[in-house]
Amino acid sequence: MLLYQPQSGYCYNSDTHFLFSFICKNLEQFKNIKGELLDIGSGSGILGLLVARDFKKLKLNQVEIQEEFQFLSHKNSQINKIDNQLHKGSFLDIDFRDSLLKKLRFDYIVSNPPFYPSSVVQSGNESIKIARYNDNLPLEQFIIKVSKLLNNGGKFFFCYDVKLLNDIIKYCDKVKLNIEALQFLHPKQSKEASLVMVMARKSSKTRCKILPPAIMFDEDGEFNEVTNKVYSLCATHSIKCEV
């Protein structure tokens, strides 16, 4: 999959590759993957395009607030021959409707959202700030709106700063999003987890399972076998361009 990215500004990283692998593992238990898919904060389009590429009965919707990434999401959809409906603007403000102006509800929602708190030292690049820091998409409001947009039984996949896991559990429980699977991403075997990947389901009562931890690097700082398999699964090739 060819993906254009900005020459300067936020570029997708391994978080998205691991999240896609997590999504695929958890969808293995379901036989007929179809319906409406929404990718929140699509950026260059990578996550939603990968899911739509491998689950061809899903109809891809993307939402993106930044104009340069709106352009890239659309361009990357075109070059990879994947139909998409692009919703332009803030996820929290958009009234999602289809081409016939009928209200949309989703069967699958995926997101690698901005999750760094505003207290963290921020980049001076405005595009990177919007893509990384949760000022414009606070966690509680993000989860509340996702719940409103999901059909009953709908599935929500996302990753977030592991330090906020308590809040994730609390907010999901409040809006009847039952967490069915968690997986923790560690930079190295000897390091604490930095990221948590979450699968939640609307109005479900299935008990939560904890998948084996995902480790990115060996102790020498090289990609390990697991990471190489994740990258092979995604099979992406990045091209930098001026937007």
Image (cartoon, rainbow, N blue to C red):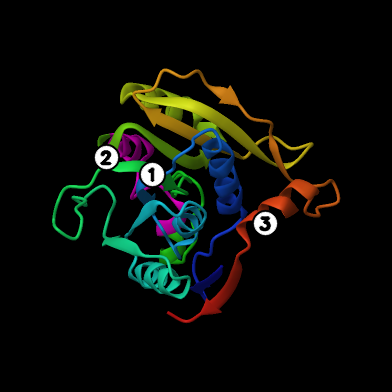
Q: CA distance from mark 1 to mark 3?
A: 22 Å
Residue 40 seen from this side: no
In the rendered image of this protein, does residue 107 appear above or below residue 93?
above
Between 102 and 45, which is closer to the camera in this rendering? 102
Q: Contact, CB < 8 Å: mark 3 with mark 2? A: no
Q: Single out the residue that lies furthest toward the right.
A: 220
The three-letter code of the residue at mark 2 reads Leu
Q: Which secondary structure class fits the magenta region best?
A: helix
Q: Position of residue 216 (x, y in %)?
A: 72, 47
Q: Secondary structure at mark 1?
A: strand
| Furthest-bottom residue in this view | 242
Q: Against 208, is 73 above or below?
A: below
- What residue lies at 44% left-to-right and 62% top-to-bottom? 45
Q: Are marks 2 and 1 in contact (CB under 8 Å)?
A: yes
Q: Could you tell which of marks 1 and 3 lies nearer the N-terminus?
A: 1
Q: Magenta segment range?
A: 130-147
Q: How packed is label 1: few (under 14 Cα within 10 Å), some, or many (20 or more)? A: many
> Which sits earlier in the primary sequence, circle 3 or circle 2?
2
Regarding residue 50, the answer to whether it shows in the image is yes
**172 vs 110: above or below:** above
Residue at image x 32%, y 22%? 174
Residue 239's tag is none
Quarter that holds the N terminus: bottom right
> From mark 3 to mark 2, how far is it between C-alphas?
31 Å
Q: Which residue is mark 3?
A: 231
**Element at badge 2?**
helix
Where disc 3 sits, the SS reads helix
Residue behind mark 1: 109
Q: The residue under label 3 is which amino acid type?
A: Tyr
Q: Residue 70 at what x, y percent from top left?
A: 35, 68
Residue at 57% over, 23% down: 209
Q: Which residue is the site of mark 2? A: 149
